[in-house]
Amino acid sequence: MLITTELQKALRKVGLLGASRSQRQYPRFACCIPATMHIPERDYELEGLVIEISLGGALFRPAARYIMERTGSEIMVRFSSYKLAGRIMNTRDFGYGIRLNSLLRQDDIDMIIDEYGIQAPAV
């Protein structure tokens, strides 16, 4: 099925379609950070890994065998001393794409890189 550019924009605006790599606002950094993701509406918590992080978002890979469709859900990701509130913008086979409610500071990204040995931006 072919999706028009206008429909893609509309779906992205309401959070039903993630951004393409060329449209990312902030560079992503590959990482492997043990974390938990809390979904308040279900009072449910998932253990897993943050496998990408940027100033405005993260990719969370749950340790669970199955990934449930949660697009649009408000969440809280916790690792180290960080508590990051956001919304799941897309659900994929390998994890949840999260847009953070508040941007991380570059200092935060630098500290996370130092602490977790993150290398170059993810492609």
Image: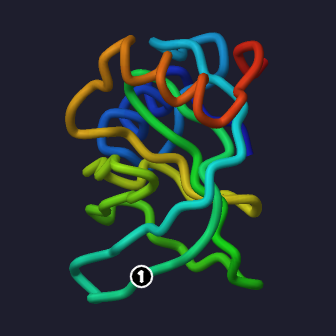
Q: Position of residue 8 (x, y in %)?
A: 50, 31
Q: Position of residue 65 (x, y in %)?
A: 77, 84
Say how many tags the image has. Answer: 1
- Indicate the secondary structure of the residue bearing disc 1: strand
Q: For the point 35% across and 73% down, which residue is it?
A: 38
Badge 1 density bin: few <14, some 14–19, many ≥20, Cα 10 Å: some
Can you say which quadrant of the picture contains the C terminus? top right
Left or right: where 104 falls relative to 6: left
Q: x and y percent of residue 42 in the render?
A: 29, 88
Amino acid at dot 1: Glu
Report the colour scheme. Answer: rainbow
The part of the image, by quadrant, that contains residue 104 is: top left
The reply, left or right, for residue 5 in relation to residue 74 is right
Task: Give left or right: position of 28 versus 94.
Answer: left
Please determine whether, in this image, residue 120 is positioned above or below residue 48.
above
Q: Position of residue 63 (x, y in %)?
A: 70, 75
Residue at 22% across / 39% down in the picture? 101
Residue 11 seen: yes
Residue that lies at the very extreme toward the front in this rendered image: 115
Label 1 sits on residue? 45
- Residue 103 relative to residue 122: left or right: left
**Residue at 26% in and 62% down:** 74
